[in-house]
Amino acid sequence: MRILRWAPALFISLVAPLLLHAQTYGESGDVPYVPTPQHVVDAMLKLGNVQPGDVVFDLGCGDGRIVVTAAEKFSATGTGIDLNPKRIAEATENARKAGVADKVKFMEQNLFESDVSQATLVTLYLLPEVNLKLRPRLLQQLKPGSRIVSHSFDMGEWKPDKHFDADGRILYLWTVTEKAKAEFANKPEPGGAGH
């Protein structure tokens, strides 16, 4: 009986800090590092129709596997952006080992401050609220015809052009258009996040 009386207090003391921490994701650009399996990386790049000459930006690049694969298998160039210096060092080493260090670069940077205007494809595996916060910035910077592929999470009211099930992992594709820019580039995300 005493355990039941203390259960709410115990729950609040143990779980509340985790919930509070989870709510702060996206404010600093920080998201948990969860590597994308290689077969999903391949599916993301295929869905994004990567071609030689494409410029792939991966926001929250982790160990760099998406831009490395884009360079290695599709003859694209790429830039990976991540806040974690350990991940940037790992990504740089992975590019060197794959023989594509001349085609890709990695930057330790806040993805909300990054210039992605040169990208023809942007890849994301972030969190739903981070995608929504990024949406106006991506639409302001990317040229019409640029593509965005997200692993697992959509962009709210901006409906994807396609989605694909990669063995239980849903991937989303959007193509930047003038219409999307007009409709969503200056529209605050629901709930007023980012204010």
Image (tube, grey):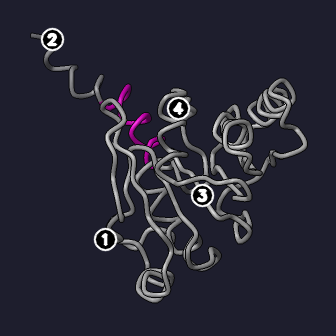
Residue at mark 3 to residue at mark 1: CA–CA distance? 19 Å
Give the residue number, with chain letter if any, for mark 2.
Answer: 2
Quadrant in the picture for residue 61: top right
Q: Does the CB distance between marks 3 and 2 fall below 8 Å?
A: no
**Marked residue nearer the N-terminal end (4 or 1):** 4
Percent of width and height locating residue 109 = 76, 52
Q: Which residue is mark 1?
A: 157
Give the x, y percent position of residue 11: 28, 26
**Residue type, label 4:** Thr
Task: Write down the residue under mark 4.
Answer: 36
Q: Which disc, if any, is residue 148?
A: none
Mark pair 1, 2: CA separation? 48 Å
The label nearer to you, 1 versus 2, is: 1
* Residue appearing at x 52%, y 54% in the figure: 48
Q: Nearer the viewer, mark 4 or mark 1?
A: 4
Residue on which the image places disc 3: 122
In the image, the segment drawn in magenta is 12-23
